[in-house]
Amino acid sequence: MPIRPAQLAALMREVEQEDPIDFADLPFPEDELRDLVANHLCEMAAAMENFSHEDRLMTLLAVSAKLVLENLVLHIRLLRRHGLPVSEDVEMLLTRLRKPSV
């Protein structure tokens, strides 16, 4: 049974209780942004209706990985713009990525 956009938006709010999003001073209402994303993701899921279970999972993992990477890049840019250090975990990851593979 596919999830409806309103249900997904509600789940997003629940997840945000543990890991809040800093909407800062964006000129858009937070709930409208959640609804926009929830609608888009539900449309994407509906477009994968004929995909195999494995292909759906791989596609969702790829989309999730891209979004996590994009978020990491934006977070690092924001910290650098304000002259703030990255967290120890992020610094360890970046250090590991800078080392040439053996």
Image (cartoon, grey):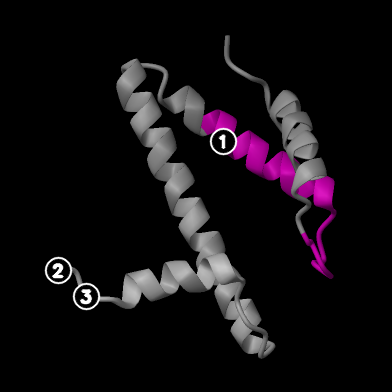
* Magenta: main secondary structure: helix
Q: Against 62, is 47 above or below?
A: above
How far across and how far down the image is residue 90, in percent? 53, 68
Residue 87 as seen in the image, left or right of residue 91: right
Q: Which residue is mark 2?
A: 102
For the record, the magenta segment spans 22-43
Q: Residue at x 34, y 70 (%)?
A: 97
Q: Which residue is mark 3?
A: 100
Q: Which residue is mark 1?
A: 41
Q: Please check the rendered image and state whether residue 42 is part of the magenta-colored stretch, yes or no.
A: yes
Q: How many marks?
A: 3
| Residue 55 sits in quarter | top left
Q: Against 76, is 20 above or below?
A: above
Marks 2 and 3 close (CB-CB < 8 Å): yes
Classify mark 2: helix, strand or loop: loop
Residue 45 as seen in the image, left or right of residue 48: right
Q: Residue at x 79, y 34 (%)?
A: 14
